[in-house]
Image (spheres, helix red, strand yellow):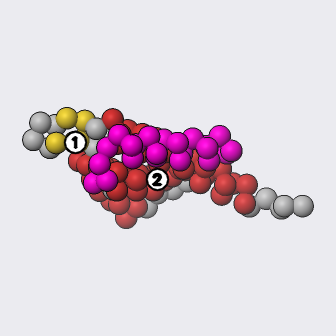
Amino acid sequence: MILLDIAAPIFLLLGLNSTSAANTSLPNNFEIVATAVIALMIFKEKISARLWCGIVFVTLSCALLSFEDITSLQFSFGSLFVLLAGICRGFENNCTRKISSKDPL
């Protein structure tokens, strides 16, 4: 978890340094998708139809905003770093939830 807490801000800053604020704002919400999908795949949690709908819309909007220029479909590599930061935070969220249920003593 310590490595994830270190990697996520580094990836986010690399993404912010290499792309515009518009290409960074919504893909930063990919943390929601990463948290839900990791919980489904690794921790076998159930995902409701309403959450699946939200996951699809957030993923589509992140994909749409990952292009620098929509007319030429040029991919922004800065957005990739922002998505990696969201994935790191998604793993960290799931690990923290598992640890928080334990007795601290």
The residue under label 1 is which amino acid type?
A: Glu
Is 6 situated above or below 29?
above
Horizontal side of 104 relative to 42 (left or right) equals: right
State if disc 1 and disc 2 touch (CB < 8 Å): no
Q: Residue 70, percent across and down?
A: 14, 44
Residue density around tag 1, few if under 14, some if 14–19, many if 20 or more, within 10 Å: some
Q: Which residue is mark 1?
A: 68
Task: Specify the principal SS of the magenta part.
Answer: helix
Residue 98: quarter of image: bottom right
Horizontal side of 91 relative to 69 (left or right) equals: right
Closer to viewer: mark 2 or mark 1: 1
Q: CA distance from mark 2 to mark 1?
A: 21 Å
Looking at the image, which residue is at 44% across and 40% down?
A: 14
Q: Residue 89, percent across and down?
A: 54, 50
Q: Quadrant of the N terminus?
A: top right
Q: Residue 101, percent across and down?
A: 74, 61
Give SS at disc 1.
Answer: strand
The residue under label 2 is which amino acid type?
A: Glu
Asked if residue 71 can be seen in this view, the reply is: yes
Give SS at disc 2.
Answer: helix
Q: Residue 22, percent across and down?
A: 27, 54
Looking at the image, which residue is at 40% across and 56% down?
A: 29
Horizontal side of 48 relative to 62 (left or right) equals: right
Q: Is residue 5 magenta?
A: yes
Q: Give the label on residue 42, or none.
A: none
Q: Quadrant of the C terminus?
A: bottom right
Q: Which residue is mark 2?
A: 31
The segment highlighted magenta reads: 1-22
Residue density around tag 2, few if under 14, some if 14–19, many if 20 or more, within 10 Å: many
Looking at the image, which residue is at 83% across and 62% down?
A: 103
Q: Earlier in the sequence, mark 2 or mark 1?
A: 2
